[in-house]
Image (cartoon, rainbow, N blue to C red):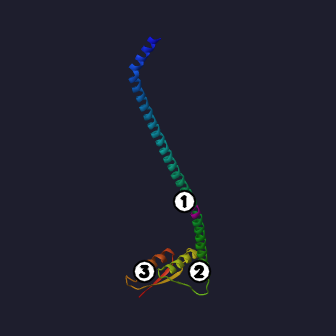
Amino acid sequence: DLKLEGQLEALVAKHKDEVAQLRVEFNDSKAALKAEKEHALAEVKRLQLEIEKEKRVREDAQEESRLNTEALSKENVVNQKRLEAYEQQLKDLRDAVISSIDSQLMSDVPLGLFLSGGVDSSIIAGVIGKILGKKSFPAFSIDFNSSYESERAKFLQVAEENQMEHTIFEI
């Protein structure tokens, strides 16, 4: 037994340095693995935070988009109502102008139109042309013979488009 113990002690002494070296290497590996694990866990945490941040940004953008869409939808409804109201007002104005001009065309005496080439007389000429159809209606214009003041081109065009008997007085 003593012999065996002696051999064992010799063997232990022989490999003591190797075991110590293996323990150091094992502890170093263990520490390195622990550091890598901590680094990996920190990286996972960082990535999770980044994903959460991106998720919040995406959710915020979706909410903003939803709100913008909702606001545009409401604005479109309001604009559609405004457009309909405007179109109704335009129709009412058109009907009132036509009715007023039509009532003035009933007369016991001959009628005519002073056609300046401006907006008012051009509208009246257009309405008279539509009311009378192919019938001719007398129109009178004044041309000032000055290229600056002359609206000749305008009143000639209106008279022609509405088939009016057009008389021009030159001044």
Residue type of the residue flagged with mark 1: Asn
Residue type of the residue flagged with mark 2: Ile
Q: Residue at x 58, y 78 (%)?
A: 97
Q: Quadrant of residue 156?
A: bottom left
**In the rendered image of this protein, does residue 128 appear above or below residue 84?**
below
**Circle 2 SS class:** helix
- Is label 2 in contact with label 1 (beta carbons under 8 Å)? no
**What secondary structure is the magenta-colored segment mainly?**
helix
Residue where numbered disc 2 is placed: 101
Q: Residue at x 47, y 39 (%)?
A: 38
- Farthest residue toward the front? 2
Which of 153/107 is in front? 153
Distance from Cα at disc 3 to Cα at disc 1? 53 Å
In screen coordinates, is 109 left or right of 49?
A: right
Mark 3 and mark 1 lie on one chain; the one further toward the N terminus is 1
Q: Nearer the viewer, mark 2 or mark 1?
A: 1
* Residue 80 image offset from top left, x and y in percent: 58, 65
- Look at the image and give the residue range highlighted in magenta: 71-75
Distance from Cα at disc 2 to Cα at disc 3? 24 Å
Residue where numbered disc 1 is placed: 68
* Residue 21 image offset from top left, x and y in percent: 39, 26
Magenta highlight on residue 72: yes
Which of 8/64 is in front? 8
Which of 27/77 is in front? 27
Residue where numbered disc 3 is placed: 152
Which of 7/79 is in front? 7
Distance from Cα at disc 2 to Cα at disc 1? 48 Å
Mark 2 and mark 3 lie on one chain; the one further toward the N terminus is 2
- Is label 2 in contact with label 3 (beta carbons under 8 Å)? no
* Residue 36 image offset from top left, x and y in percent: 44, 37
Q: Residues within 10 Å of mark 3 (few under 14, many from 20)?
A: some
